[in-house]
């Protein structure tokens, strides 16, 4: 029982790490797109 609980905790930790990477990546991508759109609107590009 304890081994399954430990295995589940490891899987949860791995999932949290993956989710964190995806959220940070999506945030950086969204920020880049927003800056590009704002610069295009301002006709700086």
Image (cartoon, rainbow, N blue to C red):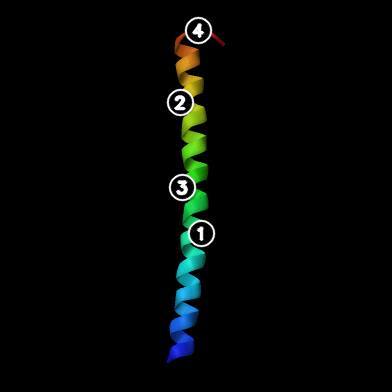
Quadrant where the C terminus is found in the figure: top right
Furthest residue in direction right, as rendered: 45
- Mark 2 highlights which residue? 34
- Mark 3 highlights which residue? 23
Report how far apart the C-alphas of labels 3 and 4 lie in the structure: 30 Å
Tell whether label 2 touches label 4 (CB within 8 Å): no
Above or below 41: residue 6: below
SS for tag 2?
A: helix
- Mark 1 highlights which residue? 17
Disc number lying in front (3 or 4): 3
Q: Which residue is drawn at 45% across and 17% down?
A: 38
Dot 3: few (<14), some (14–19), or many (≥20) neighbours within 10 Å?
A: few
- Mark 4 highlights which residue? 43
Disc number lying in front (1 or 4): 1
Q: Earlier in the sequence, mark 3 or mark 1?
A: 1
Dot 1: few (<14), some (14–19), or many (≥20) neighbours within 10 Å?
A: few
């Amino acid at each position: 029982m304890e081994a399954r609980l430990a295995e589940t905790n490891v899987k949860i930790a791995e999932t949290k790490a993956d989710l964190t990477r995806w959220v940070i990546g999506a945030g950086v991508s969204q920020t880049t797109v927003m800056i590009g759109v704002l610069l295009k609107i301002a006709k700086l590009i």
